[in-house]
């Protein structure tokens, strides 16, 4: 029952936002009644600062807990949990898509209220939000010492975003929604300027790595972060005509 309510909440998140807290609330009540022990998602942290974050993320945590199985250990429905990894992976992709859709719509509305153009908004805040999972993946593998995997993930995700992230929507748009009509890109000047600046930044980073013998140091990492902050500042400042 809790799984059904959580799935309904996920589907209704886009069309009927009011139904989301209702379904999640019912799932919480039912789960507390039918379970002898409370799952870890219902355990309130001791820190006062973390209690607010816990309450804010509880609906999503409940939904994830009941619909995405933990395939790392134990058993579920009479089967070893490790055999359910395809379902875990598929549900993770579904939730990622739903949350990115909500984040993109909310970000666009916030950008319009702030007077920011759509191209700059997509290049900065929306891009940062959608790339955050890649950032976490690279961070996790880097902590494990797999530096090559972290770098490959960063470049591979960008290749995927550019070739498939743009190619598939354009194919769907020009084939099914508006057959035979070309795609008109708004804000072409801003996009061209961004691409030129991105090429310059990449050239600087590549030259620095070659000169340093392909060894990444703390200074190189700080330099990359500084380059991104400078780039984002230039883009946002130019959009507001500050310079």
Image (cartoon, grey):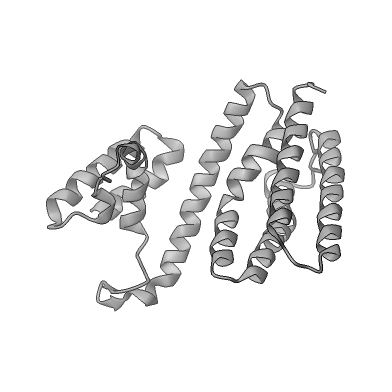
Quarter location, residue 86: bottom left
44 relative position to 86: left or right: left
Residue 136 place in picture, x, y as percent: 55, 56
User: Is residue 119 toward the left or the right of residue 43 in the image?
Assistant: right
- Report the front residue among 172 and 54: 54
* Residue 54 visible, this orientation: yes
Measuring from the top left, give residue 220's x and y in whole percent: 73, 55
Residue in front for this viewpoint, 190 or 150: 150
Residue displayed at 12% across by 57% down: 36
Task: Indicate left or right for 85 with 151 as reference.
Answer: left
**Numbered circles on residues, count:** 0
| Residue 140 percent coordinates (x, y) | 53, 63
- Report whether residue 178 is seen: no
User: Is 125 positioned to the left or the right of 78 in the image?
Assistant: right
Q: What is the x, y in percent for residue 95? A: 46, 52
Query: In the figure, 61 relative to 148: above or below?
Result: above
Residue in view at x 42 percent, y 65 percent? 88
Quarter the C terminus occupies = top right
Of 1 and 80, which appears nearest the observer?
80
User: For the point 26% across and 72% down, which residue is it?
Assistant: 77
Image quadrant where residue 84 sits: bottom left
175, 229: nearer the viewer: 229
């Amino acid at each position: 029952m809790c799984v059904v309510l959580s799935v309904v909440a996920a589907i209704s998140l886009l069309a009927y936002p009011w139904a989301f807290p209702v379904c999640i609330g019912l799932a919480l009540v039912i789960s507390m009644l039918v379970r002898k022990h409370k799952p870890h998602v219902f355990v309130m942290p001791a820190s006062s600062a973390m209690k607010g974050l816990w309450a804010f993320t509880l609906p999503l945590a409940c939904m994830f807990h009941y619909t995405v199985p933990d395939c790392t250990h134990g058993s579920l429905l009479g089967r070893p949990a490790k055999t359910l990894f395809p379902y875990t992976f598929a549900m993770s992709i579904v939730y990622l898509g739903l949350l990115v859709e909500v984040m993109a719509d909310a970000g666009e509305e916030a950008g319009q209220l702030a007077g920011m153009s759509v191209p700059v908004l997509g290049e900065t805040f929306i891009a940062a939000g959608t790339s955050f999972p890649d950032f976490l993946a690279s961070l996790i593998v880097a902590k494990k010492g797999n530096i090559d995997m972290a770098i490959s993930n960063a470049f591979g995700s960008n290749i995927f975003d550019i070739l498939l992230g743009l190619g598939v929507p354009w194919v769907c748009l020009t084939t099914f929604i508006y057959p035979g009509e070309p795609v008109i890109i708004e804000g072409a000047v801003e996009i061209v300027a961004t691409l030129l600046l991105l090429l310059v930044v990449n050239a600087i980073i590549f030259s620095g790595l070659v000169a340093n013998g392909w060894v990444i140091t703390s200074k190189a990492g700080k330099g990359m972060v500084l380059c991104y902050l400078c780039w984002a500042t230039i883009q946002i400042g130019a959009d507001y005509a500050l310079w």
